[in-house]
Amino acid sequence: MKNLSIHIITGLSGSGKSTAIDAFEDAGFYCVDNMPVALLPKLLKLPLENDSELSGFAFVMDLREKGFLTKYPPVFKFLNQQGYHYSILFMEADEDALVKRYSQTRRHHPLTQCGNLLESIRAEKEQLKALRIAADKIIDTSRFNVHELKAVIFDIAQQSKKFAPMQINVLSFGFKYGIPREADLVIDVRFLSNPFFIPELKPLNGESPEIQNFVLNNPETRIFLQKYLDLLDFLIPLFEKEGKAYLTIAVGCTGGRHRSVTIAKAIYKHLLSGQHTINITHRDIEQDIYTAGSIS
């Protein structure tokens, strides 16, 4: 959960919080409207981050919940202590706009008991003053129509995905066993010198120092690796900018046992210096090397 962005949407009644939560939902966020603030820590412990399509979380919390003003400070303090990264989005509008919206929808203001509508709006402003000061972003929706507001919130949602590091999977494979369906980028390293034809190296695989020395000490390999790693360093931020949650880099040789394993490990080690979660898998390393026609 801590790798995903969390947005807490709050503010004045009638300021467009329902429209905001709809925009976050369209952006792939897990959303809950009128979320009881005390339940937030419990919800964040659920294994929802296993959903590869999940962009983050967005919750609407406001004065509709009785006791909200006294409950939210300790909960937000707990989130800070636990290392959760969240932002408070405070939505507001001027009095004329709020009065007009309530007259159009005929809804009751949550503080109706405070007097007439205008008095209720002013009472809510006063009660939420501290939360407004603590907000990371304040949006005045007075001059927005529904579509304009949704576009603004959707852009915020898209930008916030930058705070959810992309997971990168490096995968070695053998072309003779098929290209992995999950691959986003495929690099064919069959042009590199093949240790399969060296009798003492043939039984080994790319995990062994002997194979790694053979493959990586080749001048062509060093030039190729430098250029390909430069390409990955250029591409990965662009994929992440587009909101991609997972990126699979597949490295293939003929049998998936020698060259692809070695190059995949080199890519993996290079990417470890970044801020992403990196995994490596050697899909075909255990395939029978003595299978007829097997050249890795």
Image (cartoon, rainbow, N blue to C red):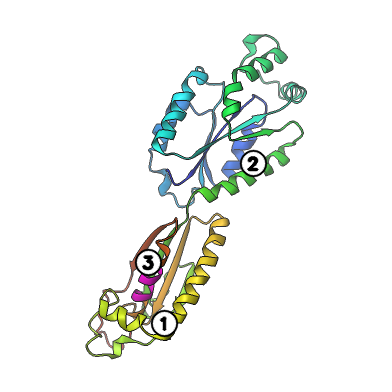
Whichever of labels 3 and 1 marks the residue nearer the N terminus, that label is: 1
Identify the secondary structure beneath mark 1: helix
Residue under label 1: 221
Residue 269: assigned label: 3
Whichever of labels 3 and 2 marks the residue nearer the N terminus, that label is: 2
**Badge 2, how many Cα within 10 Å: few under 14, some, many 20+?**
many
In space, the residues marked 3 and 1 are separated at their CA atoms by 16 Å
Identify the secondary structure beneath mark 2: helix
- Give the answer, above or below, for where 175 lies relative to 31: below
Is residue 118 visible in the rendered structure shown here? Answer: yes
Q: Which residue is drawn at 38% across and 39% down?
A: 46
Kind of residue at disc 2: Ile
Q: Does residue 85 appear to the left or right of 17 in the view shown?
A: left
Residue 265 sits inside the magenta stretch? yes
In space, the residues marked 1 and 2 are separated at their CA atoms by 47 Å
Whichever of labels 1 and 2 marks the residue nearer the N terminus, that label is: 2
Q: Residue at x 66, y 31 (%)?
A: 16
Quadrant occupied by the C terminus: bottom left
Q: Which residue is drawn at 40% across and 34% down?
A: 81
